[in-house]
Image (cartoon, grey):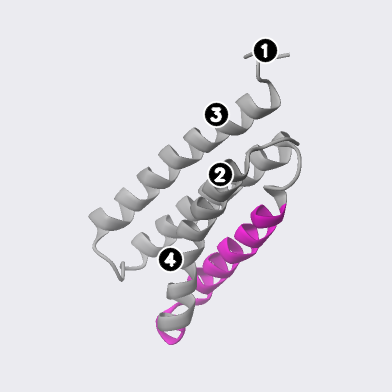
Amino acid sequence: MYQPLWQIWLNVVFIAFVARRAAVGVGLHWDDLGTLLRTSHISVLVVCAWAAIAVWLRAKWVIASLVLVAAAFTFSTAIELSRGPVLPAASMVAQVVLAWIGCGFLIRLAWRSEHPGGSRA
């Protein structure tokens, strides 16, 4: 897939934004996390690793990986909120909203790179 380097770096920044919170949760709060929350954080990190590879592939893979990263992040945040958040709840919700806005923007960029004329075919 042809994507400009700056666009690939935006995808990497998005992935790093999501992976950072999961990595901090695993690294700093491992003993305080329950099994479900540990599993969700590790799943987010695995999805982020896959997405880091997928950004170099076709637009369909990029779009699928970005949606999967945002969905895993949302699921992990929901679990964390239900178990008693480490961060203030408003901050966590704001991060999820920002992640979905960023995901939508990056999906639009990936779609336009694959279909420069705006065609949906």
User: Quadrant of residue 48 in the image?
Assistant: bottom right
Amino acid type, residue under disc 3 in the picture: Arg
**Disc nearest the viewer among 3 and 2:** 2
Task: Give whichever of discs 4 and 2 has the lower sequence position.
Answer: 2
Q: Secondary structure at mark 3?
A: helix
Q: Which of labels 1 and 4 is toward the front? A: 1
Give the answer, above or below, for where 80 lies relative to 59.
Answer: below
Query: Which sits earlier in the primary sequence, circle 1 or circle 2?
Result: 2
* CA distance for labels 3 and 4: 25 Å
The earlier-in-sequence mark between 3 and 4 is 4
**Which quarter of the figure is the N terminus placed in?**
top right
Which residue is identified by label 2?
Answer: 6
| Residue matched to label 1 | 119
Say whether residue 45 is left or right of residue 79: right
Q: Secondary structure at mark 4?
A: helix
Quadrant of res 31? bottom left
* Location of mark 4 (residue): 21
Name the residue type under label 4.
Arg
Q: Is residue 121 depicted above or below 6 in this figure?
A: above
Q: CA separation, marks 1 and 2?
A: 23 Å
> How crowded is the residue under tag 3: few (<14 C-alpha within 10 Å), some, or many (20+)?
few
Q: Which residue is mark 3?
A: 108
Question: Taking 12 as reference, is 117 above or below it?
Answer: above
Quadrant (top left, top right, bottom left, bottom right) of the C terminus: top right
Helix, strand or loop at mark 1 = loop
Q: Are marks 3 and 4 in contact (CB under 8 Å)?
A: no
Circle nearer the N terminus (1, 3): 3
Q: Residue at x 56, y 31 (%)?
A: 109
- Mark 2 falls on what kind of element? helix
Residue at mark 4 to residue at mark 2: CA–CA distance: 23 Å
